Amino acid sequence: MSWNGVIGRVSFSNCDPIFDGIDENWSILPAPPAWLTGHVMRRDCLTAPIPAADYALNHEELFLLPDLGIVSSGDVGSVLLFGSRSLENMRDIALPSDSSTSKVLLRWALKNRGLDPKFVESGPDIDTMLSKCDGALLIGDRSLMASMERPDLVRLDLGREWSNATGLPMVFGVFAARRDSPLEDLRAAYSDMMSQLHKFEFDEDWRSQVITRSSHKLGFPYERMDDYFRREVRNRMTDTDVNGLTTFLRVACGMEEDPTWAFHSE
């Protein structure tokens, strides 16, 4: 299939409300967040949710789809710093290879607190990470799993940290596309993704089915995933969220320009 018939998706549960059921019309390319940026840039897919920090690095070649994102207001639940020491006493922190935004956000948050630990790149496995370092940053489903299995090791929720410091929501992921993408195809992809999200938000039976599949996939109780999608992660981006995104891009990523959008909301 041609690249303009492919949509990339994060290989975590945080985008299930958008992508569950959409594969009837599109070929779906699942990958870790940091890999999706390369897939978009190489034309492996038409659009994908990429790390907001990666958009800052490539904003001259990319634009964003409106209304869609990976967003939290307060606790995000799946971008967490773990450790056996207190945050203030961590000498070094292992950073996962599958993330971009969370690493930029963690560096910003620790600098904001006047802390300066050493950072070590690592594969995203909590046991391996904590065998090397005092702290371990995990994202996505691995973070959710680790927080359920070892809640005593959770030291920082980065969504909460950002919101406490700025009073704004945190946009971890944005739906990006190359600026030379065919707009007709991009609008079709956008329309289908928005339709799936609307269905999740307003059709209680469908919402229950999606959450059931997500909880079975991870082996989690239904109630935990329901709470995750109800209180922690959401995919519809509001004007307030865009303000949070613009602030993050500026203060944490050093991007002076405002985000560029592919088209206005429909």
Image (cartoon, rainbow, N blue to C red):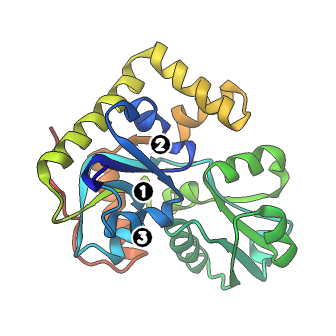
Q: Report, in whole angstroms, how far the alpha carbon at label 2 lies from the one at label 1.
A: 10 Å
| Label placed on residue 207 | none
Query: Where is residue 219 drawn, in percent x and y?
Result: 74, 34
Comparing 175 with 160, the one in front is 175
Mark closer to the observer (3, 2): 2
| Residue type pointed to by label 1 | Gly
Q: Residues within 10 Å of mark 2 (few under 14, many from 20)?
A: many
Query: Where is residue 17 drawn, in percent x and y?
Result: 45, 34
Which residue is at 40% across, 35% downward?
Answer: 23
Mark closer to the observer (2, 1): 2
| Label placed on residue 53 | 3
| Label placed on residue 15 | 2
Which residue is at 52% across, 75% downward?
Answer: 108
Query: Where is residue 192 drawn, in percent x and y?
Result: 28, 34
Which residue is at 13% across, 52% downward?
Answer: 183
| Residue type pointed to by label 3 | Ala
| Residue type pointed to by label 2 | Cys
Query: Which of the 4 image quarters holds residue 253?
Result: bottom left
Quick one: SS at disc 3? helix
Q: Residues within 10 Å of mark 3 (few under 14, many from 20)?
A: many
Quick one: SS at disc 1? strand
- For label 1, the residue is 173
User: Decide: marks 2, 1 in contact (CB < 8 A)?
Assistant: yes
Q: On screen, 187 above or below 138?
A: above
Residue lying at the far top in this picture: please name it: 205
Specify which label sits upstream in the sequence, 3 or 1. 3
